[in-house]
Image: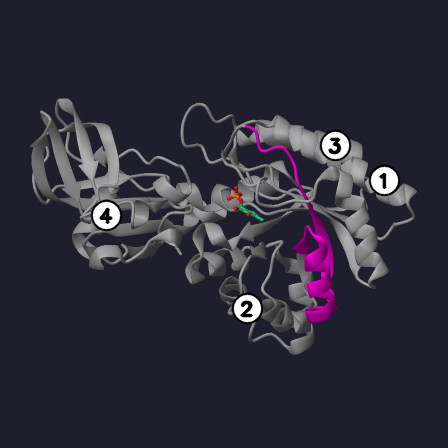
Amino acid sequence: MISKARLKKLAEEHGTPLLVIDHDELRKNLRTFRKYLPRVQPYFAVKAGSDLAIVRTLFKEGASFDVASMPEFDLVYENIKGMPAHERQQWIWDKVIYANPVKPVETLAELDKYKPLVTFDNLDEIEKIKQFAPNAGLVLRLKVSNTGAMVELSSKFGASPGEAVDLILEADRQGLVVEGVSFHVGSQTTNFQNYVEALNLTADIYAEAKSRGYTKMNLVDIGGGFPAPYDATVGPFRELAKIINSEINRLFPKEIEILAEPGRFFVATAGYAISKIIGKAIRDGKPSYYINDGVYHTYSGQIFDHCRYPVKAFKRGPTKLSAVFGPTCDALDVISQAENLPDLKRNDFVYSEMIGAYTYASATSFNGFSPATVLHVNE
Ligand SMILES: Cc1ncc(COP(=O)(O)O)c(C=O)c1O
């Protein structure tokens, strides 16, 4: 946790807009995950914070990685390029999953030499993998309930339970090896029941595959979705972990490897955005502050991730309901129409906490405004 005083000092030293990433917090989140889910190997979903320094810190802590594009794979590869070839190959086998169920054929062709683990959820993908990455290991992505998740993923990805084993057998018929089943319960899932249902469905798929003669599966990938503690409605991680542990131990024998792809859980609480007021007006009787960061930049998670990041002031004093706008000319660039803020002046700093996941990863340079400078601390 970085104190308000330190954040302010960093903004004075480095200028704004600034996004501070606290690497102590990254390490702490990884350790918490491991402590409460000892049977689960975490593959950090790089998309949540696709940054070389973040990947390096988690790499040094022994994390594995979920990548979903070639540039994300390259961010991970950067850490192992110096390893002897054999060791490097072993590391990729052990520690990387390419978890985008639909892949360009060029990517498959590039990945094939690494004999990667890749997800799939449809017939066309089996044909592509057979032709362009025949050395890959396959993981069937299952469609599961995303009810209660902040970001719904099940309408875009996942084989239905009725077609799952047919797809597994078809991949087998084409000479590919399906090593297991994966799912994603939706990002920022506060409905812990989603994991219970998904794990039971996965056990059913395992049983059906076995009854139809397929016995090569040895892993279950429980995806991401582990919620960040954005507000008091989010239950403690240890409670979710207790539920998951009890289900995996009940449903899957010890030999089955359990993987997960946490993204948000590792990086959300590590990020702090600091910006400054560049203009002030009274609109409809409400103080309205224009700051030098917005929804095209660090606050892009408000659009793409359906998240909200309260804006706070360093200054104290009586507060008024205020609006906070980003710097661009677009009327969409509204961070909040209802923030309780004290009376602020031009050049005053404001900040947001828990803004490390899916934020600067989707920042643009729209309207000529560059994304915030990213500052890594406690590396
Ligand atoms: C396949 C896959 N794995 C993992 C993640 C990371 O999810 P989260 O950030 O909710 O942990 C995502 C997010 O979209 C995803 O699509």
User: Regarding mark 3 in the picture, which secondary structure is present there?
Assistant: helix
What is the three-letter code of the residue carrying label 2? Tyr
Residue density around tag 4, few if under 14, some if 14–19, many if 20 or more, within 10 Å:
many
Residue density around tag 3, few if under 14, some if 14–19, many if 20 or more, within 10 Å:
some
In the image, residue 12 above or below residue 319: below
Which residue was labeled with disc 4?
Answer: 293
Q: Measured from the top left, where is residue 271 in percent x and y?
A: 36, 45
Which of pointers 1 and 4 indicates the residue nearer the eye? Answer: 1
In the image, residue 289 above or below residue 321: below
- Comes first in the chain, label 1 or label 4: 1
Does label 1 point to a residue whose CB lies under 8 Å from ligand 1? no
Say which mark, if any, is on residue 200.
3
Q: How far apart are the two marked residues, 2 and 1, measured between alpha carbons?
A: 37 Å
**Camera-nearest residue between 50 and 282:** 282
Can residue 62 be seen at all in this image of the molecule?
A: no
Say which mark, if any, is on residue 208.
1
Say which mark, if any, is on residue 77.
2
In the image, residue 186 above or below residue 293: above
User: Regarding mark 1 in the picture, which secondary structure is present there?
Assistant: helix
What is the three-letter code of the residue carrying label 1? Glu
- Comes first in the chain, label 2 or label 1: 2
Does label 3 point to a residue whose CB lies under 8 Å from ligand 1? no
